[in-house]
C-alpha cells in the first residue's frame, strides 16, 4: 500500500491510501488547506491506524461502510461502500493492519 497526497479538483489537498492493484482503500474524508497539513494528517493516520476505532454502518443506500475515529474525529473513510457487513469489516481490518506499513506520504 502507498499513501498519496495530492490536490483534489477544487485545489485542496487530501491523502489517499492506494492498494498495490491501484484501488483506493481509504482516504482522509476531508480536504486540507495546504499540502503540509494533508501530509501531517496522512502521517498521523499511518502511525495511529491500529489504535483508531473502526465503526461499521449501513448507509442510506443499504450498503455497508466504515469510518475510523481517533480523539472524537473521523480520520479515515473507505474508497467505496460494500454489499455486506462482513466485506466492510474485512476492508476496515485490512486498512487497520496494513496502513502502518504503507509507503509515503
Image (tube, rainbow, N blue to C red):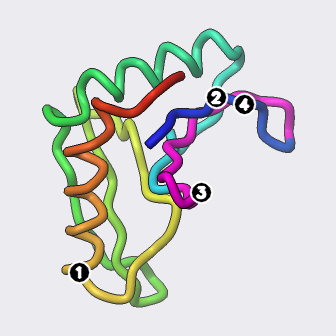
**Residue at numbered disc 1:** 85
Residue under label 3? 22
Residues marked 1 and 4 touching at CB (< 8 Å): no
The residue depicted at 30 percent of the width and 64 percent of the height is 91
C-alpha span from label 1 to label 2? 29 Å
Sequence-wise, the earlier of marks 1 and 2 is 2
Crowd around label 4: few <14 · some 14–19 · many ≥20 (10 Å): some
Which label lies toward us, 3 or 2?
Answer: 3
Q: CA distance from mark 4 to mark 3?
A: 15 Å
| Mark 1 or 2: the one toward you | 2
User: Label 2: which residue?
Assistant: 5
Between disc 3 and disc 1, whose residue precedes?
Answer: 3
Q: Which mark is residue 6?
A: 4
Cα distance in 3D space between marks 1 and 4: 30 Å
Q: Give how far across and how far down residue 43 sits, in percent.
A: 41, 19
Task: Identify the magenta region.
Answer: 10-24
Give the structural element (helix, strand or loop) at label 2.
strand
At 29% from the left edge and 46% from the top edge, which residue is drawn?
68
Mark in the foreground, 3 or 1 = 3
Q: Going 64% across and 28% down the picture, which residue do you hit?
A: 5
Pointers 3 and 1 in contact (C-beta within 8 Å): no
Of all residues, the one furthest to the top in this rendering is 36
Image coordinates of residue 23 in percent, x first then y, are 56, 60
Q: CA distance from mark 4 to mark 2?
A: 4 Å
| Along the viewing direction, whichever of 101 and 86 lies nearer the viewer | 101
Lower sequence index among marks 1 and 4? 4
Q: CA distance from mark 3 to mark 1?
A: 23 Å
* Up/down of 53 relative to 25, above or below: above
Up the image or down, 83 lies above or below 57; here it is below
28 relative to 32 in the view: left or right: left
Q: Residue at x 36, y 19 (%)?
A: 44
Crowd tier of the residue under label 3, counting other residues whose Cα lies within 10 Å: few below 14, some 14–19, many 20 or above: few
Amino acid at each position: 500500500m502507498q499513501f498519496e497526497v495530492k490536490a483534489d479538483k477544487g485545489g485542496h489537498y487530501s491523502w489517499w491510501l492506494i492498494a498495490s492493484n491501484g484501488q483506493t482503500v481509504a482516504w482522509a474524508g476531508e480536504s486540507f488547506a495546504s499540502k503540509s497539513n494533508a501530509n501531517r494528517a496522512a502521517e498521523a493516520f499511518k502511525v495511529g491506524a491500529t489504535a483508531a476505532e473502526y465503526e461499521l454502518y449501513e448507509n442510506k443506500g443499504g450498503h455497508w461502510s466504515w469510518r475510523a475515529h481517533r480523539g472524537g474525529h473521523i480520520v479515515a473513510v473507505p474508497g467505496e461502500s460494500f454489499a455486506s457487513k462482513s466485506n466492510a469489516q474485512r476492508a476496515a481490518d485490512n486498512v487497520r493492519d496494513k496502513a502502518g506499513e504503507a509507503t509515503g506520504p
